[in-house]
Amino acid sequence: MIYSPEKLAPLRATRLGIDTHHEPTLYLRADSPVCRSEGFESLPRVKATSANRRLIIASLNMITSELLDDDQVGFSESAWQMLQVEENDSIWLSHPRPVHSLSHVRAKVYGHRLDQEQLQAIIDDIVGGYYADVQLAAFITACGDDKLDDEEITSLTRAMVNAGSRIDWELPLVLDKHCVGGLPGNRTTPIVIPILTACGITIPKTSSRAITSPAGTADTMETLTNVSLSLDEMREVVRKVGGCLAWGGSVKLSPADDLLIQVERALDIDSEGQLIASVLSKKIAAGATHVLIDIPVGPTAKVRTLEAANKLARSFKTVAENLGLVISVLYTDGTEPVGRGIGPALEAHDILAVLQNLPGAPADLKERATLIAGAMLEMVQPLEPGEGQKIALSQLESGAAWNKFMAICAAQGGMKIPPIAPYRFALITEQPCTITGIDNRQLAKVAKLAGAPADPAAGVELHVKVGDRVEANTALMTIHAESVGELNYAVDYLNDHPRVIILTDADNGFQDHS
Amino acid sequence: MIYSPEKLAPLRATRLGIDTHHEPTLYLRADSPVCRSEGFESLPRVKATSANRRLIIASLNMITSELLDDDQVGFSESAWQMLQVEENDSIWLSHPRPVHSLSHVRAKVYGHRLDQEQLQAIIDDIVGGYYADVQLAAFITACGDDKLDDEEITSLTRAMVNAGSRIDWELPLVLDKHCVGGLPGNRTTPIVIPILTACGITIPKTSSRAITSPAGTADTMETLTNVSLSLDEMREVVRKVGGCLAWGGSVKLSPADDLLIQVERALDIDSEGQLIASVLSKKIAAGATHVLIDIPVGPTAKVRTLEAANKLARSFKTVAENLGLVISVLYTDGTEPVGRGIGPALEAHDILAVLQNLPGAPADLKERATLIAGAMLEMVQPLEPGEGQKIALSQLESGAAWNKFMAICAAQGGMKIPPIAPYRFALITEQPCTITGIDNRQLAKVAKLAGAPADPAAGVELHVKVGDRVEANTALMTIHAESVGELNYAVDYLNDHPRVIILTDADNGFQDHS
């Protein structure tokens, strides 16, 4: 009496055209015979097998209307893509096995340490699709704050690497960088990579999309060129021009991380352990051997104090060492946003200005990019401290980096002009004042409400820096949006939060000039 | 430039007949003008307002097919019921306000204490529908284990009471009971209430459905009579016969608890703070003044040690005292299941046997029910210890309790005969042996896999008690299911877990006799 789903009559697949985001969902008539005979009605998740033996675990929604026939199973877009079936293909549904690794998640909630085997079981079940979103949320929350020690973070990182594919670039060393974030506009990678490539270093760079910020490097680069490269395409680009600036998500590096990140985005919960495991698993899977970690430190950055930075740096170093990765940590100024633009296309404009050595290019972005490129050079070449940045500056100012950037974009499929948003709102100060502070978190929120990163042209253009003295009727920032609704929403937030930009003489000076 | 959703052209409501469980979901054409103009595409949640000014916050799924027209908004079943609209009614969609209380959830993750105001903000946003399921999961997990202190539990309980309606029975005292659970088959309430009512105590009892167990009192009572009573109907039943046995969910007591419980079910995470707040908020909202808490203690019950029971009892007492509730805590034996049946209808059969004083009625269920009824009598009447149980026994054995039970069922809409499952599987021991233990958790899992509590006839019938000596070829238990698929699934689990029933002479003696 062994349970065998194939004995049941199959259902006919049909694509409903419902986008349920990343959570695959199947739809079944509540009054269908298979639903009654298998007791699916009360089941939150179901296993679906196709004739070609592919399988997915998906959420199950019951249909109480004529949307489906009795013998049909409806697919959401993500379920359709994951199972790779055609209309009317045969599908067998069955109960998924119990998710034993959830007991390890519970153990973590109760404050127990998890070992390699337990964390691997959790990650394998996550990648297998056995975790519903609420269960992912529980795992993320249970690991929140500093509830994973360095040994657990090492195990988690290893588990995440094991659960995906891993690139072998067949290079003696592969240099990479990561910024822990929290600083709007801090988009140095598209400048750093061409500088290093111009120095003759082969650097296959994969970047991620934004998690909780208004833009990730992949989002910004996508406004400038194609970033969705297969592994073979990346290899070809790197072979041709010595470097690439691609999105890492298209090559299934650390797929567990991709699933966790989707839920982290909704929760906005920072976990030091998850952060380190996310970053290092992606780097190891991407084939990196040497990694520079940039930690911006500032009262409204992700890392707020030097003490917190030291703690994070120590964990990064311990875990990297456990995993055989060479790592260097750089603290940078995190007191205010970098450059002018915040949002994919707005940041792209800043990057182009720096690479092209335009007169008005943001000096702080240039300084940061060369500092980081210099530190990376010093990791792999016998240089005196400071010498790296000088080399980086000369590659940038000579135009060599700009030439490399154009070559990379051309090799990835051609350069594009970043879009410009049709709807705008300028925040004007009524009276002369001095800018005494800018709240990174609130500013990022404004850019996100305006539509960034999903709307590439949306975001915030900042016209002032901390310390600037401005006259009356000066625009402090301009919100860019691709729709009126989003523009209004961002303006409403600004209205409710008068200290996004902190002024000496007036509290924000917010005025509705629209 | 104030944002005003009513300025937009409304969408036409249409009921899609999709049951997304409790999470209300709306569906919108991805290429519709409103979607582009308002930037809804990337929005996980949306606010929907009807012409009669009702509003809900719902998840948003994009439609990429012809399922909807451009000017339509599709409704899931729960969204349709919550907004109470008709086909083609006008609906305005807009961005929901940011959920500020999520910062308090994050604070809890980071180990901070939450005050009354913060917990009230969280609970109000949960009841308002602002929390997605993953955010509810984060809140539950963040409060998991013992991460709420007694003061926080008091605040949470108060917040949950404030967020719902509260029954005033207009009685000098209202006696209630609660069992913290974890003991399959421990269904004493339907016996206790008629005993107390027969003693002349007015007792308006509301019960909940199962959270993580194979049956709740409301699930079991539903196989015997109608339990979905409005408040007025309950009042009428109580006025007529002195007591009721109704489902509490139909009167919106502590609605936050109902939402949290749905997600707790999927997570299976026990939190002491959530448990106490859930129980006491429901009791206070239900108008109770005196509450007996039954804590079964045993190695595989929910509370495993006397130490844990003491800790839980202390918190229960402190929080109850803070909220002006008279409470008494009773520890009971939690080493093995109670009675024979596990699952709504199977437990109902045990209850009927005890109430009718049938010769084969489970003695342990009778002993427990009278112990609890006696302890409750002693809370409100001047009795010597032990005297209460004697009175309870006499009410039961005289048939007075059975008469009261029939009267209550008749008043609630008439008595029903509990259903019997069509599919069964008997676990037989091959050789003589002694039963040395029964795993409550694993046994509950078997009953749930068989379909309990959603399938009322499903569950497990236990034929042995710990200490029993049985001959070869004796049935130890019978699994009952309403479908073949569920029966197989429960049998598979039993096959994989040979120590659900622990024997001296053989390891389970599992044999597939089907």
Image (cartoon, coloured by chain):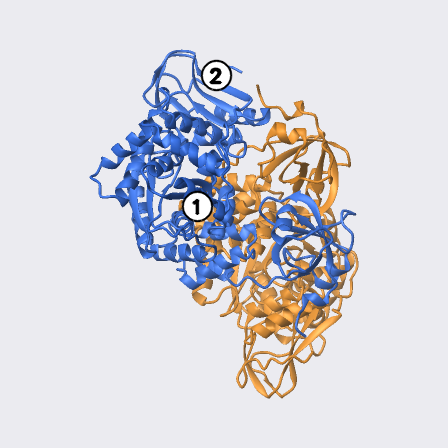
Chain colours: A blue, B orange
Which mark, by number, is residue A511? 2
Judge the density around disc 1: few (<14), some (14-19), many (≥20) Cα neighbours within 10 Å: many
Residue A317 left/right relative to B144: left
Q: Which of A246 and A170 lies nearest the eye of the viewer?
A: A170
Q: Position of residue A252 (x, y in %)?
A: 50, 50
Q: Position of residue A137 (x, y in %)?
A: 51, 49
Q: Residue at x 57, y 51 (%)?
A: B263
Looking at the image, the residue that sits furthest to the front is A240
Instruction: Evaluate if marks 2 and 1 touch, with contact meaning CB atoms under 8 Å apart.
Output: no
The quarter in which the C terminus of chain B is drawn is bottom right
Which mark, by number, is residue B108? 1
Q: Position of residue A284 (x, y in %)?
A: 39, 52
Distance (Cα) linking label 2 and label 1: 36 Å
Judge the density around disc 2: few (<14), some (14-19), many (≥20) Cα neighbours within 10 Å: few
Q: Chain of mark 1?
A: B
The quarter in which the N terminus of chain B is drawn is top right
Q: Is residue B235 above or below residue B460?
A: above
Q: Which of A175 and B269 lies nearest the eye of the viewer?
A: A175
Q: Nearer the viewer, mark 2 or mark 1?
A: 2
| Amino acid, disc 2 | Gln
